Structure formats: structure tokens, C-alpha cells
Image (cartoon, grey):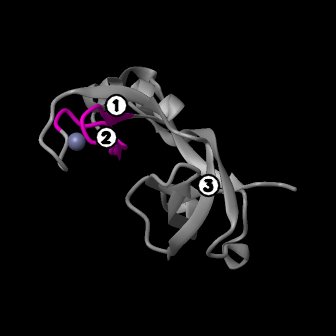
């Protein structure tokens, strides 16, 4: 990701901030400028819940350059407690222990790369809820 794109989205990536349409109530993550459901531009900031369940996942064996050391890893669709779905890496679990329907929580992580200027990247991932 380019430094400027990273910078623009830094708060969303830290805090799971999306937005919600004031006209029709739909929630978006990442945030949008125009509601794709009704066309309204009246959108407000919306803090997403940090817990949900894994509804679908895939195991990645061939990673993009720079991420090879992380393979195999799991990318999944997490349905948050309010029904919003986000795509994220599932972490802190062995690939063979990942199951559809398992409860997960958000966790902020450092990415394994540094951008120009030494800026360290963070992003969100989800890990199983320990009971
Ligand atoms: Zn709308």
C-alpha cells in the first residue's frame, strides 16, 4: 500500500470505523462518501463492534511479496455483532483449527513491512475469542 493511502485510512484501520447512511441506515466498512443503496451523501461515522463470528474463510498458501513468512494464513469474512461483514486475516490460531461459525474478536497488529520513512503499518485482524 502506498504511504498516502495508508495515511488517509489510518484511523479506520486502528479503530474499525465505518459509516452509516442517515437516510436508509445501511452501514459501510470501509467508509464511503455516497450510500450505494440509496445515493444519499448524508453519512455519519459509525464504530463497528469488535466481536463477531467467522462465516467463511480461505487458507492462503501463496502470499504476495513480503508476506511469504506468514503462509499459510487464513483470510475470512467476519460477521460482526451488528450484522456488518468485514474481510480480515484470522490470527492466533492454527490453520487446521479454524472453523466456520467460531467467535472472533478484533486485534490491532503490526504489518510485517515498513513503508518509506520507517513508518510502521498497523491493521486489524481477528482472533478466536478465548473462553
Ligand atoms: Zn442510504
Which residue lies under the disc numbered 1?
A: 6
Quarter of the picture containing the N terminus is top left
In the rendered image, the residue lying farthest to the bottom is 96
Quadrant hosting ligand 1: top left
Residue 110 image position (x, y, % from top left): 57, 37
Q: Nearer the viewer, mark 1 or mark 3?
A: 3
Position above or below: 96 against 81: below
Q: Earlier in the sequence, mark 2 or mark 1?
A: 2
On screen, residue 77 versus residue 1, left or right, reads: right
Secondary structure at numbered mark 2: loop
Classify residue 96 as left or right of residue 30: right
Residue 52 numbered mark, or none = 3
- Mark identifier at residue 130: none
Q: Looking at this view, is 42 or 77 the one in front?
A: 42
* Label 2 sits on residue: 1
Q: Secondary structure at mark 3?
A: strand
Q: Residues within 10 Å of mark 1 (few under 14, many from 20)?
A: some
Amino acid at each position: 500500500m502506498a504511504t498516502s493511502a495508508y495515511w488517509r485510512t489510518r484511523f479506520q484501520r486502528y479503530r474499525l470505523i465505518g459509516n452509516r447512511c442517515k437516510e436508509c441506515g445501511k452501514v459501510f466498512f470501509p467508509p464511503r462518501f455516497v450510500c450505494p443503496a440509496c445515493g444519499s451523501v448524508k453519512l455519519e461515522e459509525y464504530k463497528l463492534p469488535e466481536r463477531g463470528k467467522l462465516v467463511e474463510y480461505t487458507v492462503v498458501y501463496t502470499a504476495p511479496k513480503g508476506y511469504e513468512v506468514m503462509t499459510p494464513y487464513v483470510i475470512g469474512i467476519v460477521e460482526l455483532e451488528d450484522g456488518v461483514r468485514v474481510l480480515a486475516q484470522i490470527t492466533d490460531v492454527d490453520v487446521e483449527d479454524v472453523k466456520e461459525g467460531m467467535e472472533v474478536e478484533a486485534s490491532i497488529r503490526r504489518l510485517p513491512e515498513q513503508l518509506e520513512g520507517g513508518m510502521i503499518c498497523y491493521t486489524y485482524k481477528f482472533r478466536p475469542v478465548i473462553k
